Amino acid sequence: LDVPDTPIIPIIHGDGIGKDVGPIAQDVLSAAAEATGHDIEWMEVYAGESAREMYDENLPEETVEAIREHRVAIKGPLTTPVGAGFRSLNVALRQTLDLYANVRPTYYLDGVPSPMKAPEEMDMVTFRENTEDVYAGIEWEAGTDEAEQVRSFVEDEMDFDDVMHDGDIGIGLKPISEKGSKRLVREAIDYAIENDRDTVTLVHKGNIMKFTEGQFGDWGMEVAEEEYPDDEVFAAPDSLWEEQDEVDIPEDAVMVEERLADAMLQWMQLRTDEFDVLAMPNLNGDYLSDAAGAQIGGLGIAPGANFGAGRCLAEPVHGSAPKRAGQDKANPTALILSGRLLFEYIGWDDASTLVRDAVEDTIESGTVTYDLARQRDDAEEVSSTTYAEAVIDRIEDLA
Ligand code: NAD
């Protein structure tokens, strides 16, 4: 993405622990930018609790406009108050800005406790479709007229009279479209090409849900076959059912293959080094990316970003962890590493690498926040602020 010499980057510090980790993660990212000869003009914008205090609304138009205009932004977690009629602000932001791909890199950092035998083999990026599937929110509550109307339509008019049990029933829809599937897979393939990755694996449950998940796989393979030259992207034939060892893949081409979602959860752990980029419908992506993140340090570490419509909104995977808020204890690493994705999006690979190296050195040296300290005998628990200062010191040493 072309950005001005000094890009304006909107930042939402967020609710709960966002108030602790937001400002210090911003300092770390500024330090990395400065050390690599870049300059950022931060623009603080508001959503969630802070926006309610200032504007009396959850998601002010100014915030949405700032992200729309500047095209790259970073946010901490936002609390979704429990209660009827409250739409998740995160979902609202993603939908309003058409950020249809949720991207989470999952890679091992030295010094992070992991239950895996060979965690250093984990280096995957998951692309999760962000707008469709059973998460589209099209559902009807048991006992309502709407649910009964849908039931009679399905039973009587569609001839599925034998699949629904008697009595109250909740019903939801699972829309998966050609447009939604193809743009997600395209994003994943482009990422694989740009980042010298070997494979893109389409993960679905198409053997059971043929016309939704199965279509996702078919449409994804169509993108691979029809939109890229064979020597750049190779759509592996019959990869769902056959080992691909025998397949002759053009050198340097990205191989696009399919895997069933349940099997994939096993392969991810047993043959971690075989997977690079995964592209999935919404629900599979939610489960798989959380499972992958748990293998290499969990929520305090896991970065993410939402892409779509030429924009990038970086955000950690974790929420606002109200129990830890205001204690200067939470791990700012997830937010700091989310900033790497933003740097990469604007072509600042040098700043991105520096952030990773500095974070990894700091954790390896045993200066860590509570979540990692409690899993390591050789580490010292420090506050969020002390940890961030240690990362900045390391950035300055390495630069
Ligand atoms: P959570 O991620 O806030 O917390 C889950 C657990 O992980 C807690 O034990 C917490 O202490 C720990 N944890 C999370 N982040 C951590 C960090 N940086 N360092 C150390 N420990 C950390 O999930 P939750 O409790 O289910 O949700 C709390 C609130 O956050 C809810 O209102 C939810 O809607 C919201 N949420 C927001 C986002 C987002 O903004 N993208 C994502 C998930 C949840």
Image (cartoon, rainbow, N blue to C red):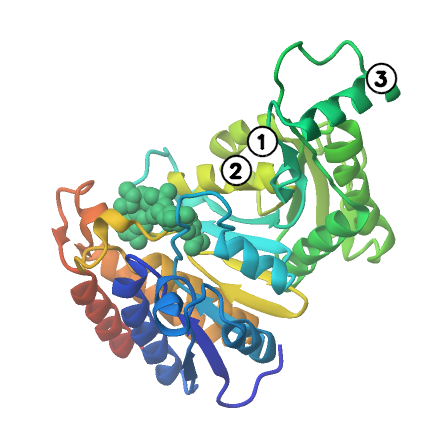
Q: CA distance from mark 2 to mark 1?
A: 8 Å
Q: CA distance from mark 3 to mark 1?
A: 37 Å
Q: Image point 70% across, 30% down: which residue?
A: 146
User: Looking at the image, do the residues carrying marks 3 and 1 touch, with CB atoms under 8 Å apart?
Assistant: no
Label 1 sits on residue = 264
Q: Image point 25% across, 73% down: which residue?
A: 392
Q: CA distance from mark 3 to mark 2?
A: 37 Å
Q: Residues within 10 Å of mark 2 (few under 14, many from 20)?
A: many
Please state the horizontal and vertical placement of residue 255, each as a whole percent of the image: 71, 46
Total number of numbered discs in the rendering? 3
Name the disc covering residue 348, or none.
none
Looking at the image, is mark 2 or mark 1 nearer the viewer?
Answer: 2
User: Looking at the image, do the residues carrying marks 2 and 1 touch, with CB atoms under 8 Å apart?
Assistant: yes
Q: Residues within 10 Å of mark 3 (few under 14, many from 20)?
A: few
What kind of element bears circle 2? helix
Q: Image point 63% across, 12% down: which residue?
A: 167
Label 3 sits on residue = 156
Please state the horizontal and vertical placement of residue 364, each as a whole percent of the image: 24, 55
What kind of element bears circle 1? helix
Q: Is residue 31 left or right of residue 74?
A: left
Please state the horizontal and vertical placement of residue 155, each as a whole percent of the image: 80, 17
Q: Is residue 53 above or below residue 143?
A: below
| Between discs 3 and 2, the one toward the N terminus | 3
Query: Would you identify the image quadrant in which residue 325 lies?
Result: bottom left
Query: Would you identify the image quadrant in which residue 168 lies?
Result: top right
Tell me which amino acid carries mark 3. Answer: Asp
Label 2 sits on residue = 288
Q: Residues within 10 Å of mark 1 (few under 14, many from 20)?
A: many
